[in-house]
Image: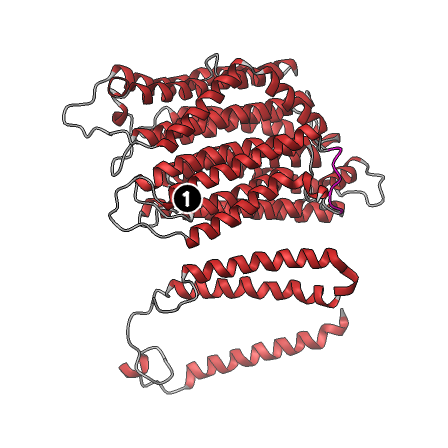
Amino acid sequence: MTAYVPILLLFTVAFALAGVFFVLGGAIGPKNPTPEKMIPYECGSESTGARFVKPSVKFYLTAILFVVFDIEAVFIYPWAIQFRALGWTGFVTMGSFIALLVVGLVYVWKKGALEWEK
Amino acid sequence: MTRLMAISPLLVVALGGVLLMLAEAFSHRREEGDVRHTGPSSELALGTAVTLLAGAIMAAAVWMVGPEKLETLPGLAPYYVADRFTLFFTFTICLGGALAALLAGGYLPEHKLDRGEFYPLLTFGTVGAILLAAAGDLLSLFIALETMSLAVYALTGFRRTSPRSTEAAVKYFLLGSFAAVLLLYGGALLYGATGHTDLAGIRAAIMHPAAAKPANLALVLVAAALILCGLAFKVSAVPFHMWTPDAYEGAPTPATGYMAVAVKTAAFAMMLRVLVGGFGDGALASWAAGWPPVLALLAVVTMTGANLVAGRQESVKRMLAYSSIAHAGYVLVAVATIPRASEEAQASVMYYLLAYTVSTIGAFGALVLCGSRGAEAVSYEDLAGLGKRHPAVAIAFTLFLLSLTGVPPTAGFFGKWYVAKTTIGAGLYPLAIVLLLNSALAAYYYLRVLVYMYMRDPAPGAPIAKPMRSGYVVGALVIAGVLVLALGIWPTTPIELAVQAALTAR
């Protein structure tokens, strides 16, 4: 455990320093608030609209589709590396897995989930 | 190919689901405002029913051949245990699913919910349910549970424009995920305590403390408690039932029926697998310091609580939801009896669930048939005078309610009789007495429907629910009605089959 003491020390110093800056800045810094200064910072441009925006469901759909079709790579890589060792059993198994994914792709395509604008 | 025979019921249903999904995507949508009762989605209903019945028939076929004789894929067990226990539950689940699909074939077009996604979802949910009954390993059990649950969450919220349906789906999703997390956490602790995820290995590690790696009993107990909570959530036992009435009421009625039969049956199959397969021996299954007294207490609270609340409901759909909780309580009585009367108690669970499946799906079907577009029959008042106006519908409803009450010669009577007989045979007289008292209590709210149908006239000026016309719903009711009577009049064969299934359960 003693090997970690320097790291603990580093954390302590880092947090203490941050705390000191924060407190000092609040205590002795000049304050001159104007309405423009009080609005939320948005990259320098003026903020518009409500704080809560309902994100379009399309984002979720795209994200889910990405995850679904991305996961297949996780399975295909190890199979490709062990291709010879797994033999025909592996080939048939992976073939049916990919066939199911193709069915899924056909489905979302036909349903129009891949079109951003409808 | 012969190696796939053992899992053919599952394969049939899964492939059918994929085909239905494609058929649904390529079918032409009906024009808005078209009032015909048959559209593409009704044909999908027939396709789903055929797929699921094919699954049930395959299960029966594999049963005839004998699953012990079949060569299976290497490494299939314990992830998929192809025994008679699985086949019996597969049959019950597929039957319930097929009847629910037929109900949907009439209900969805009538209530302008005519979107075909319902059927692939229902089929994939059934795939999950079958896997759940077959899972002999905590990993495949969890995957199966999620496959089933995700489909059912979507089915619950199928009426997208209705806030009530959406609320039901969200509530069900949140509480269902919570239950799944409890199960998962319990499973993780169990793995930590025993070093196994397969139920047989867990059982061996608990039974033989002198094994290579003795189990930490305190950890096992905590894990068992967590898993028991998760299971109780899934079978909706009081006090884990809070989501049930809302989810059942908000879902479209065929989906409610599906949840009440197929999902509950699969959850009980999972419960039997885990409790008997994983915690079946030693101190954990004793009445002194194990799960049986906990289950007995759950059963008593579930039966009594659900029956008391069911009597106060004004909505028939909600009453049926509480009735399904009460029936879960009756099944729990049989589960609690298992350590004293192993095979017979398991067989009584299986027979009860089969009887309950046909009676409940019939009752929900009759409720579907009583309503029509814009006027779903929900309250007792809606059913007033139905016996005079539409005698056939009323007779069907009566049959299913009598079966749920437990009146001979229906399936429900023999289910209850068999559970009570097993309980008395095991010497658990207080449990049997509570069971019988509760059956009497339940008769109040079932017979109340009959009183409204046959002895009351609708209040003048009240909107009268007009029964819908649908061949699919009528077909489902005829099948369910015949089975209710057949199971009640000739209960010996199904009970023998259930005993066989229980004997071979590993």
x and y percentages locating residue B190 in the rendered image: 70, 45
Pick the front one: B447 or B50? B50
**Quarter of the image with the C terminus of chain B in it:** top right
Quarter of the image where one finds residue B276: top right
Classify B401 as above or below B208: above
Magenta segment: does it hold B73? yes
Q: Amino acid at mark 1?
A: Thr
B134 lies left or right of B158: right
Pick the front one: B139 or B53? B53
The residue that label 1 is drawn on is: B156
Q: Residue at x 67, y 74 (%)?
A: A8
Label 1: which secondary element: helix
For the stretch drawn in magenta, what is the main secondary structure? loop
**Quarter of the image with the N terminus of chain B in it:** top right
Pick the front one: B247 or B121? B121
The magenta stretch is B68-74
Total labels: the figure holds 1
Classify A74 as above or below B363: below
Quarter of the image where one finds residue B336: top right
Residue B287 appearing in the image: no
